[in-house]
Every structure is written in structure tokens, then in C-alpha cells.
Image (cartoon, rainbow, N blue to C red):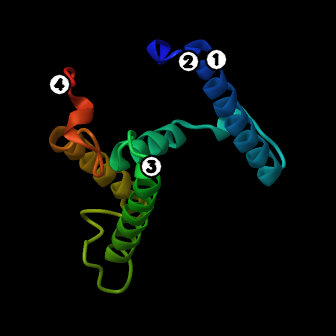
């Protein structure tokens, strides 16, 4: 950018300020929605979900995080519904000696972690990413 005559420092400051404004707006909306705010509301699962959304969709694409959020929400909801239904009812698919209903709600996170590990092993740039993004040498 500097070789094109642009002020790199100004662009960095602009992106920092715009990012801070989006963060402040998100914090404001969170506080208004819950009528109170505390550090306990920002648990590690929120950070895990945000990073997972970025990694699934691919952080270098504009619509990657959007697609990652849709895929992540669908898989999380599907796995939750599947394990809840598989452990409940008169004749459950998974017997209670193997898994209780309390354990079934945690299985979705275990499977999401496993899927995230496999994604990082076989497709580290994300589903919609490009292999050239990870190259150190851009020739």
C-alpha cells in the first residue's frame, strides 16, 4: 500500500476504529437485550463458537463467516435434536446404560470438536477457502 502512495497508518487506524464501533454496538445490543451485563455472560463457549464459525467458512472470504455460521448452527441444532431424540422416548435408540439425556446434550459439542479437528487436518483454509491463502510464498 505504501508503494502506491497510500497512508498505511491511516488505513490501520480506520479499520481499528470501525472494528471497535462494531464491537461497541454488539456490546450495547447485548446489554439492552439482557438488561444487565457481567463478565460471566462471556464464557469460553462464545469464543469457541466464534472461532469455529470463522474456521468452518474460511476467514479470508467475505461470505465465509456467514456460510460458516449457517453450517455451524445447522450442525449444532441437528446434533442436539438427534441425540435428544435418540436418548428419550419409550424405546430409545441409545440405551440409558450407554448415555443419559444429560450426557446427550454434551455429545453435540464433542462431535463439533471432532469435526473441527478433522477440518483443520484436511482443509485448514475452511470450506470455502483457497489453498493459495495458506502458502507462504505467493508466486
Real-space Cα separation, disc 3 to disc 1, in angstroms: 26 Å
Q: Nearer the viewer, mark 3 or mark 4?
A: 4
Residue located at (34% from left, 68% from top): 83
Residue located at (25% from left, 47% from top): 114
Of the image marks 1 and 4, the number of the one nearer the N terminus: 1
List x then y, in percent, for residue 80: 40, 66
List x then y, in percent, for residue 82: 34, 72
Task: Bin the neighbour count of mark 4 within 10 Å (Cα to Cα): few under 14, some 14-19, many 20 and up.
Answer: few
In the drawing, what numbered circle is on residue 120?
none
Residue located at (45% from left, 13% from top): 3
- Judging by the rendered image, the residue that carries numbered circle 4 is 139
Residue nearer the viewer, 56 or 83: 56
Of the image marks 3 and 1, the number of the one nearer the N terminus: 1
- Judging by the rendered image, the residue that carries numbered circle 3 is 65
**Up-down relation of residue 16 to residue 96 (above or below):** above
Determine which quarter of the picture holds residue 91: bottom left
Real-space Cα separation, disc 4 to disc 2, in angstroms: 24 Å
**Up-down relation of residue 81 to residue 5 (above or below):** below
Determine which quarter of the picture holds residue 137: top left
Dot 3 lies on which element?
Answer: helix
- Judging by the rendered image, the residue that carries numbered circle 1 is 10
List x then y, in percent, for residue 40: 66, 36
- Judging by the rendered image, the residue that carries numbered circle 2 is 6
Dot 2 lies on which element?
Answer: loop
Q: Is residue 135 left or right of residue 67?
A: left
Amino acid at each position: 500500500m505504501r508503494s502506491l502512495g497510500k497512508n498505511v497508518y491511516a488505513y490501520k487506524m480506520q479499520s481499528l476504529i470501525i472494528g471497535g464501533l462494531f464491537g461497541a454496538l454488539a456490546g450495547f445490543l447485548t446489554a439492552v437485550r439482557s438488561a444487565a451485563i457481567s463478565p460471566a455472560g462471556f464464557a469460553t463457549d462464545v469464543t469457541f463458537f466464534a472461532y469455529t464459525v470463522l474456521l468452518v467458512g474460511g476467514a479470508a472470504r467475505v461470505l465465509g463467516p456467514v456460510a460458516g455460521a449457517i453450517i455451524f448452527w445447522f450442525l449444532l441444532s441437528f446434533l442436539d435434536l438427534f441425540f435428544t431424540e435418540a436418548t428419550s422416548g419409550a424405546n430409545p435408540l441409545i440405551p440409558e446404560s450407554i448415555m443419559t439425556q444429560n450426557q446427550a446434550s454434551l455429545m453435540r459439542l464433542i462431535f463439533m470438536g471432532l469435526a473441527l479437528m478433522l477440518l483443520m487436518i484436511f482443509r485448514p483454509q475452511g470450506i470455502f477457502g483457497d489453498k493459495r491463502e495458506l502458502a507462504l510464498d505467493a508466486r
